[in-house]
Amino acid sequence: MLTSHAALAEVHAELILVHPFREGNGRLARLLALLMALQAGLPPLDFSPLTGRGKRAYIAGIHAAMGGNYVPLAAMFARVIERSRLRAASSKP
């Protein structure tokens, strides 16, 4: 059975690689990841680690997934989940 971050990475990458739309692939993939995370009992995902230098790592993760290697993208989702959990915990009264 896949971990949450591994499942998110695999589905995210495959959706991006199918590339069904001219624009909006990343937004749609992040929306699906958010829904999957909520179904798994995770907090709403904070994708801010994908900005700046994180964006390069994200794109490298997508390229690795093209060859069937989801590990870099899974690591990125693990960071997103961890940041999301910390953010959710800090916002509780």
Image (tube, rainbow, N blue to C red):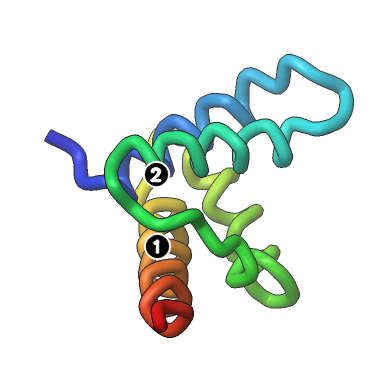
Near-viewer residue (17 or 38): 38
Image x and y of residue 87, in percent = 47, 76
Q: Is residue 81 left or right of residue 23?
A: left
Say what amino acid the circle numbered 1 marks: Ile
Q: Quadrant of residue 68?
A: top left
Image vertical order of residue 66 relative to residue 92, above or below: above
Near-viewer residue (54 or 24): 24
Residue at position x 61%, y 37% in the image: 31
Number of on-image labels: 2
> What residue would you read off at disc 1?
81
Q: Which mark is residue 91?
A: none
Q: Residue furthest left?
A: 1
Image x and y of residue 5, in percent = 33, 50
Image vertical order of residue 12 relative to residue 20, above or below: below
Local crowd at mark 2 within 10 Å, few (<14), some, or many (≥20)?
Answer: some
Residue at position x 50%, y 46% in the image: 64
Query: For numbered disc 2, what is the local secondary structure?
Result: helix
Say what amino acid the circle numbered 2 marks: Ala
Q: Earlier in the sequence, mark 2 or mark 1?
A: 2
Image vertical order of residue 75 relative to residue 18, above or below: below
Image x and y of residue 27, in percent = 72, 39
Residues at circles 2 and 1 in contact by the CB criterion of under 8 Å: yes
Image x and y of residue 88, in percent = 43, 71
Q: Quadrant of the C terminus?
A: bottom left
Q: Residue furthest front?
A: 93
Image vertical order of residue 44 relative to residue 33, above or below: below
Q: Quadrant of the N terminus?
A: top left
Q: Quadrant of residue 43?
A: bottom left
> What residue would you read off at disc 2?
37
Query: For numbered disc 1, what is the local secondary structure?
Result: helix
